[in-house]
Image: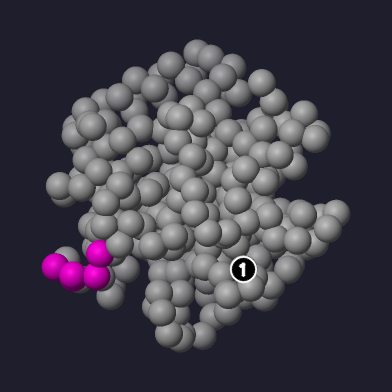
Amino acid sequence: MKSNVIWKADRIAALLLAMALPAKANAVNCETIEHRGANFTVCEVDASQELRLFHSDSATGKVLGSFRKIDNMLSEDGQSLMMAMNAGMYHNDLGPVGLFVENGIEQSRIVTSDGPGNFGLLPNGVFCIRDTRADVIESLRFVEQEYACDFATQSGPMLVIDGKLHPRFLKHSDSRYVRNGVGTSEDGQQIYFVISEEPVNFHTFGTLFRDVLEIPQALYFDGKVSRLYAPGISRHDRGFPMGPIVGVVGPAE
């Protein structure tokens, strides 16, 4: 467990080391940090890595639903899943709520109106993966600027918008869950996937992205069902089938 100060120092050292190593040397860097009395696992991924969103098997049309099934599918092409987490809310049939784009094809349309639940707690946003970068983009901004994504998933609420915390978050809220989400750097080159190791409220979760990771845009993926697959730290969370999943793809070892 690392404090914020130690984590920032280690992060600088890791960045300096990465400059001296080949781009693919460290695909995923996961570590646990402490923030406001709670522990979080943070997985940092460089945009040079192969990031994808997964939902259904292209051959059968069946929902993949688990990290194991995705890894097995990738193994058929000599690849492996290097890190993954659930990436957005879904209906009872595991279909995505809001926008979902896979391999450049829109599977589900964007939703910009407010509504019930966390998804409808506007502003919400889109995690957009393109060839050279990945970005969290507020949903109305996404529509206005007509972003073209290779992969995209919509979720909500936004945690951080242009460096500011979502205006509806309450510091002392007693709504606490294990939560996960994603944040991106201004240049779209660093992606941070985060999961809490214990129940936290939105305010605590959001301030981790804003104050510790110091990134301008961050998006909530989900709570209760939050799960992480990170073989580098011997972690494989299991449970009921999931809808959209984001993953880092690399060569099979």
Vertically, is 23 above or below 112? Answer: above
**Within-10-Å neighbours for mark 1: few <14, some 14–19, many 20+:** some
Give the image location of residue 83, x and y in percent.
54, 38
Q: Which residues are magenta?
A: 172-176
Label 1 residue SS = loop
Residue 175 colored magenta? yes
Residue 210 visible to the viewer: no
Q: Is residue 177 left or right of residue 222?
A: left
Give the image location of residue 253, x and y in percent.
66, 21
Q: Residue at x 62, y 68 (%)?
A: 94
Vertically, is 15 above or below 193? Answer: above
Give the image location of residue 65, x and y in percent.
62, 56
Vertically, is 203 above or below 48? Answer: below
Give the image location of residue 120, x and y in percent.
44, 80
Q: Residue at x 30, y 62 (%)?
A: 177
Where the N terminus falls, by quadrant? top left
Q: Residue furthest right?
A: 59
Amino acid at circle 1: Leu
Residue designated by label 1: 94
Q: Residue furthest top?
A: 20
Residue 122 colored magenta? no
Residue 2 visible to the viewer: yes
